Each structure stands twice: as C-alpha cells, then as structure tokens.
Amino acid sequence: MTATIRDVARASGVHVSTVSRTFSAPHLVNAETRNRVLAVAEDLGYRPNRAARALTTGRTHNIGLIVADISNPFFPPLIKAAQAHARTRDYHVFVADTDEDPQVEEELIQTLTKQVDGVLLCSPRLSNRVIERLHADVPFVVVNRRIKGMPTILMDVAQGARLAIEHLTGLGHRRLALAAGPSGSWTSGQMREAAAAAAAASGAELVILGPNAPTEQGGLAVAAEVVASGATGVLTYNDLVAIGLIEGLYERGVRVPDDVSVVGVDDTLSGRLNRPKLTTVAMPTSAAGRIAVDLLLQSVGDGGTSTLTTLETRLVVRESTGEARS
Amino acid sequence: MTATIRDVARASGVHVSTVSRTFSAPHLVNAETRNRVLAVAEDLGYRPNRAARALTTGRTHNIGLIVADISNPFFPPLIKAAQAHARTRDYHVFVADTDEDPQVEEELIQTLTKQVDGVLLCSPRLSNRVIERLHADVPFVVVNRRIKGMPTILMDVAQGARLAIEHLTGLGHRRLALAAGPSGSWTSGQMREAAAAAAAASGAELVILGPNAPTEQGGLAVAAEVVASGATGVLTYNDLVAIGLIEGLYERGVRVPDDVSVVGVDDTLSGRLNRPKLTTVAMPTSAAGRIAVDLLLQSVGDGGTSTLTTLETRLVVRESTGEARS
DNA sequence: ATGTTTCATGCAACCGGTTGCAGCTCGCGA
DNA sequence: TCGCGAGCTGCAACCGGTTGCATGAAACAT
C-alpha cells in the first residue's frame, strides 16, 4: 500500500491536518514542522492522492479532451497545444477517442464528468440535445461546432471554402466538386453552403459528393465519383481525403494538378510532404487548442460565459492546383 | 450542484446504503425498492461519482496510456486497439502525450497514479531507475522497451532490422546507412545492434547516422548526411523519418529507389500513401494494444507477473527499394 | 408454537484528503 | 503584570460513495 496522510502524521508526530496543510497551504505551517513533515513524507514515499483531494476541493486539475479520431493529423497539433498550455496553468489534459461513435462519445463524457474539471469537445458527433443535457454535469468548450449557450471556438471554414473555390475559379475551372465530410459533421455543412455560394457567385458549377469518411480511405473511395462528375477542380473535406483522392485519381491515370486540381483543408504535415504538395486551407489549430483551454478554465472558474471565438483561416497554395486546360 | 447519493436516499425514503447497493449490487435490493430508487435517481439526474467510488473500492476502471508523441502515426492504431479492447472489459483509456520530455512523462505518471488502475507506457523515455521507482505506485505495462520485473510487450525490431538489411543486401547494396532514432530510445539501440550484425554477416558496410528526431523533420535533416555517406541503401528509425528522408533526397536531386533505396519501419498509413510507396517493416501495433490491456488488467487483478511478450514483425516490400546499380 | 433461515434494510465506520473553528503559546505594548 | 493579537496546531465535520455487521420481518420446517 502507498503511504497516506495519516501514516505521515503518525510518523512525524503531528495531526493529519498539519500534514495536509504542509502540502496544500505551506505558509500556514511553521517552517520547522514543515521540514520535518516533508522529510518524513519523502521517506515514506508519500504522494497526495489527487482523487481524494478532488473530492473535497471539487477541483481535479485535469481537463478532458474528446476527439472523434485520434489518427486524424488535424488533432495532434491541437492536442499538443492544449496540453502544453494547460501545463502552464497547472492542469493536465487527458485525451479520449470516440472512434466517430456518438454512443461512445456520450459514455466517455459521462465517465469523465467527475474526474476532470471540464471537457474540450472537438468536432463532436453527438446531437445538440444530448450535449446540452450533459452540459449540466460538467463545463464544456466546443471546438468546430456551433452550439448556442456554450463557449465555442470555430475556425472559419466558410471563409476557407470560399477562398478555395475562388482560387479554383480564378485558375479557370468551371466545373467543381466538393468531396464532403461525414453526415454528422457541422463543419461539412458549413463548407457545403459556403462553397455553393462562392461557386454560384463565380458562375461555376458545383457538385457535392458524399458523405465520405474523413480519412484517406474516404478520399480513395470518392475518386471514381470525381472522375465521373467531370469536375476539374475539387475541394475536399480535409487533407486526408485530398491525399486519398489524389492517390485514387492517380490509380485511374488522372494526374494532379495536370488533369484535376485538388484543394485540401487543415494544412497537416502529411499534406506538406505529399507529392504533389497539397494546396490547402490552413487552420489555426494550435491557437484553437490554447484558446480552448483558456476558455475552459475560465468557465470552470466563474461558471459559464458563452463566448464565440472565430479564428481566421487562410489558403496555402502549393502544387496540387494548377490552371485549367483550355 | 449535481445530485448525490444522499439526495436520492432522502427523496426516496431509504438509507444511502440502499441507494448505493441499487447501483453497485442490485441483486441485494428488493425489486420494488430498487425501481423506486432508480426512478428517483433518474428524476434527479443522479450519476454515481466515479472518483468517490474509486476511493473506497480502489478501482477506477480507467487505464492511462502514455505516449511520447501522439502525432506519430505509429501510435493511433495501438491507442485505438487498446481503447476498443478496454471497453469490452468495462474500462476506459485516457491518453497523455509527453512531448518526448522525460520530465513531463514523470509528472504525468504521478498525476495518473491514483486516477487509473494501471498505466500503459509506450516507448518511455524515462530511465529504468525512475520507472522502477514509479512502479511502486501503480501497475505498469511497458511497450517497446525491456525493463526487467515488469510485464513487457516487445515488437521484434531486431528481427525487423535484420530482414530489412538482408533485403537491401539481397538487392545488391553494399554500402548501407541506418538513420537512427532519438538517443533515449531503447528501440533504436536494438535496431542498431541487429542492423550492424546483419550487415556484417552479409559483408556489407553500415554507417550509423544520428541520433535523429523520430519525425519527418528528422528525416529531412539527415538527408545531407546520407548523401555524404555514399550509402545506396538506408534503413530508417521509422516511416516518418523515411518519408522525410525521401523528401530531403528528392530536394537534392537524388531519386528513390533509382539512386537510393529506403526502408521504413512501422507500416503506417502515411507510408502506404507516400509516393513512392514505402518498403517497410510492419509492426503488429493493434495486437500490441490489445495484449497490453489484457496484461495490465491481469496485473491489476493479481498484483504483478512480469511476462515478456515478443511480437513478430515482417517486411513489406513496396516501391521505395530497388536493385543496386552495378 | 418455536427455532432456523433467508431476505431486505439500516447503521456506522471507512477510503484519503480539506477546512472552519477553537485553543494554545508566545511576544509585545501598556 | 495583564491583555491582546499573531502564529501554529489540533479537532472534527465533511466530500460521495462502499461494505461488514446487526437488526427485523417474513418464510419455512418441525
């Protein structure tokens, strides 16, 4: 068994409350006593039990971070930024993966409820109704989805989609396709609307293909439809889909960017190292991670503002897009 | 505030212990009472506080999973397999990223200690001594590193390295290089030894380059050294390094596999979608994740076996390796 | 009618900490 | 010399559950 506060108290001849204070409010205990207690504690290998502490203080100093798919390279920078930033605030971040399954997502949130002070929900797949219900149990910050009444961080995908479409029409493409994301995705809906509007404004045609899995497989799978559609410019749900799509097109003898231009979204490292290097919409994921933590800790503190933060996106032009052939 | 067991007890006119049993040992309470309690609980939105429960039972039903770098595509399959498998055992997995920093790693383990029933250490960067000390506080299962006295899962990288080197020498390459991993990595040490032995056995030369960061950047950075070494066959620490290296060689006008053959390790999706598709050593990561969970739950149960499980690796030949030019 | 089980529930201690309050000691000023 | 405040420390209740034991009632056997 590991040593408890009472073991330390007994061994150093003081009351448990003194030991407790030695760790949680050192200035309240006499330097001499404190040193003795610390020495004994060290000796016994005592470590405060954070779970027990949380029971009375109501603060775990942990935050939960829930993502739909940890293997999507979009998330790691966000996770790392959140983690690093949380550490400066004396918090730790624990990540859980829902595997794109709303049921698992709900279960995880339930489990997390009393073990963390707040939860960061990244691209949740749960319905608004369920999220609102769960919100009664634990503070949330939502990333990549708009739910009113909750602190929210959005990346301006609409703007990104517009930039991408304008880039494509600017290169002379008149027949465009959007390889959409999964059906539950709020982001995908935003992209669709913005892309449709931007295409209409430029007098280009836009066909929506999907829903697709937000993965390379999704991209591979949609390649046939892209070819069939006759589109020469494609905007994809994310970089992964773009990479898969390019591979799929390649397998069909369609060259990128010579025959078809492809624009990704997220600006992941994989996209940067793909060949051709991806033209993509860059998302401020690290900033989102940091801000999310700040927002969360703030709403843990005071109880709940419902700020909406929208972060700008920008287009990064690389090699996967080119002029339309005349 | 959320409802507690006492609120439910009061509202349904029974003692708290009855409410407690309703949830944790339903068969001990009369069906009628049980239903009444459940109804009241539902009504009040009561959820058992898992942290409080853990305090008396000593079981959190959580397991911690610590990785050095969550953005390394090697980990997600392992994480997902562990998570899925744990769920079938009524456990949840929480992941933390150490950012390759031993200090952060230690801190995280400390934090996790009383909040999980056991910890999965994947490719830990901490010294054996520290790990052994921490082991007194919480059960461990170690993946990708040999620490005696602890349940361990190893992927046979030595075998993988041998296969890779033999593949290269079989193609006629006589001057080989190993782009090693970070200095703290046990795996990297294993690779180095096995590769050296295999090269010697085939009468080929092997130069060790590194240590390198286990990332694309690491691969990019080592490209110059590879060129300078005159090697025509390169084994890298992992797929990421291989991808970065290929990119770096490409920038220097060196073609893969025409001028230089490159073998990765891990068989990640990125490697499969890279162009050229990576020849690589496949690691049984999903199996490792599942087995790790089993081992951990087992040692949570009985107290600590120190099994050593070694998983086979295999070589997957794709497009990044080819015959040496004569 | 009595003794023995069985079943359901209550009681109270306990898990490992925290914290408001009270009491003690000491030094200082009057 | 006394009173007072400051500084430490102890006491005990509390956080939200669990669980061994005792109690009481009903069911059963004799």
Image (cartoon, coloured by chain):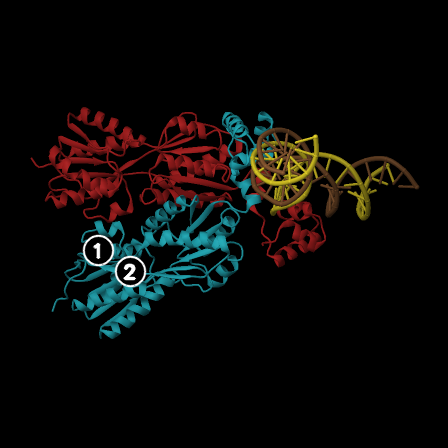
Chain colours: A cyan, B red, C brown, D yellow
- The percent coordinates of residue B163 (x first, y second) are 24, 32
Relative placement, left or right, of A228 versus B146 is left
**Mark 2 Cα shell of 10 Å, populated few (<14), some (14-19), many (≥20):** many
Give the quarter of the image for residue C29.
top right
Q: Give the residue at the far left of this rendering.
A: B326
Q: The residue marked by circle 2 belongs to what chain? A: A
Give the quarter of the image for residue A37.
top right
Relative placement, left or right, of B136 versus B154 is right
Q: Which mark is residue B206?
A: none
- The percent coordinates of residue A38 (x first, y second) are 51, 29
Q: Which mark is residue A278?
A: 1
Relative placement, left or right, of B63 versus A11 is left
Give the quarter of the image for residue A324.
bottom left
> Above or below — where is A254 with respect to D3?
below
Residue at 45% of width from left, 48% of height from top? A63
Relative placement, left or right, of B147 versus A55 is left
- Secondary structure state at the residue bearing disc 2: loop
Front position among marks 1 and 2: 2
Q: Amino acid at mark 1?
A: Leu
Of A207 and A323, nearer the camera is A323
Q: Amino acid at mark 2?
A: Thr
Q: Judge whether residue A284 can be spotted in this image.
A: yes
- Secondary structure state at the residue bearing disc 1: loop
The earlier-in-sequence mark between 1 and 2 is 1
Give the CA distance from mark 1 to mark 2: 16 Å
Of A258 and B209, nearer the camera is B209
Q: Judge whether residue A99 can be spotted in this image.
A: no
Pointer 2: what residue? A313
